[in-house]
Image (cartoon, coloured by chain):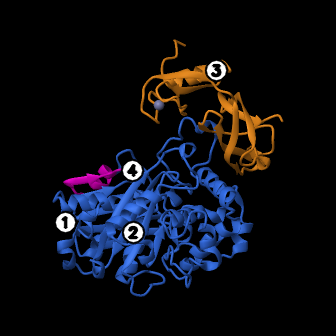
Chain colours: A orange, B blue
Amino acid sequence: MPDATGPDQIFQRALTNGEIVLPRCDDCGAYHFFPRVLCPHCHGTAISWHPASGKGRVHTTTVVRQKLERGGDYNVCVVELEEGVRMMSRVEGIAPRDIVIDMVVTAFVGGAEGQPAVLFKPAEV
Amino acid sequence: MTPKLRGKSAIVGTGHAGFGEAHGLTAYDVMAQSALAALGDAGLKLSDVDGLFCTMMEDSMPALMAAEYLGIQPRFIDGTMTGGSSFVNYLTSATMALEAGLCDVALIVYGSNQRTASGRLVTASRPPAYEAPYNPRYPISAYAMAAARHMHEFGTTREQLADVAVAARAWAQHNPEAFERGPLSLEDVLGARMVADPLTVRDCCLVTDGGGAIVMVRADRAKDFPKAPVYVLGSAAESSHRQISQMKDFTVTAARESGARAFDAAGVSPADIQVVELYDAFTINTILFLEDLGFCAKGEGGAFVEGGRIAPGGVLPVNTNGGGLSCVHPGMYGIFTVIEAARQIRGDAPGIQLRDVDLALAHGNGGVLSSQVTAILGSQNTL
Ligand SMILES: [Zn+2]
């Protein structure tokens, strides 16, 4: 794969290497997600990449009910990261029904649909 | 729309087709039958139509397909796709086009055969790249997460969500056009199969076939048609996001802005509205929109709908046809909010006809609470 140049490529390449990086605007200092060529807050175009702290909190959550033979129930949630951005994800290592709003979670690079993806697990206290 | 366009256009025909199951028909067949019904209602012919406002779930160029199917060559066309809100949004563009002389007869039209074609909600849209890997089920996962957040912040209960479904069914039971007319109790909703917590299958809209159409003309000739004209007093849109993960506040929709501007254009306030038609894709929608449109304060929507308060005989008539929850939901429901509002004003609603309706509100929702469009319609008395 040639050098990653586009915002999506940079994000996905980092995931492939087991890292989670987030785009931050050099002009206003705010993070954003999903990756793009401009800052959605101030519309500046100077974007740099920073390793994510991995600290997050479940902003909202649902259990998608599914028959056992098709894989059973699973979690879909939106996590707010310490950096102020939100992403859709799921929390693993805990029953979907036990995941609650405001639960403190930690990001890791796992697999979703056969591709590296940002997933979360309950934070260790 | 600004106050400048208040009452400049009028609905002179409404029609629908294929409600429930339209066996053997394509989505475009249902669209065309709806168009003919609305034009018949207005005493017009397809050849009179020179402005077409249409989107469907089938193609990437559905408005062109519709024009071709209908055998018309419109000189003004709008196929803006904002999901189910599109058809309420066309009230604005149709009013502008009519007022500017870009067309003389505007036809807003939609059709779908999603129930008999597949039994699933058909959508031409791809799952967003940063959400798809987590397998959210669209659109219910998004609405479930909005409901969860509303419950968390305001103490809204599953019983209150269920109240919305029970009220919709109570209206539908009087409407011979409605698809689901059997009894539905609070216990039925609460005991129904959970699909995405906290929403059960009875918190979700129907999956039916169906189409709808609206004919609009300039106000100055609106009285030349068989039915009493229904004037567009105000309409306004606001869009806040596309993907649910990008929604800033899961408990506040852009209906706050669309509603405020529609009320401003119409020069009326929520207290003046006699009947409310909201896009109730899920029970949480009704609660969110009642709050955001100003019928109650933020967080009080749950209490507002409790105990039959929006059911027949309640304090505010909401979704008098039975809504997307119990009347019809062919993929995109928005056009039916306008049709039912217009029929309540004209006095020919198919179910419970409220008395002396002069002012009605229709509200469309598109995407995953993404696009909000509010319209305020009025009788001759409101001009
Ligand atoms: Zn910036």
Q: Which mark is residue B81?
A: 4
Badge 4 and badge 1 both on one subunit: yes
The residue mark sitting in front, 2 or 1, is: 2
Q: Secondary structure at mark 4?
A: loop
- In the rendered picture of this protein, how many numbered marks are placed on residues? 4
| Image position, residue B109 (x, y; %) | 34, 61
Which quarter of the picture shows residue B217? Answer: bottom left
Name the amino acid type tagged 3.
Thr
Q: Which residues are drawn in magenta?
A: B63-80
Q: Residue at x 65, y 78 (%)?
A: B307
Q: Secondary structure at mark 3?
A: helix
B193 in relation to A29, above or below: below
* Residue type for callout 4: Met
Disc ID at residue B338: 2
Between marks 4 and 1, how big is the CA–CA gap?
A: 25 Å
Three-letter amino acid code of the residue under disc 2: Val
Give the mark, 2 or 1, whose residue is nearer the N terminus. Answer: 1
Q: Residue at x 50, y 62 (%)?
A: B292
Q: Residues within 10 Å of mark 4 (few under 14, many from 20)?
A: some
Q: Which residue is mark 3?
A: A16
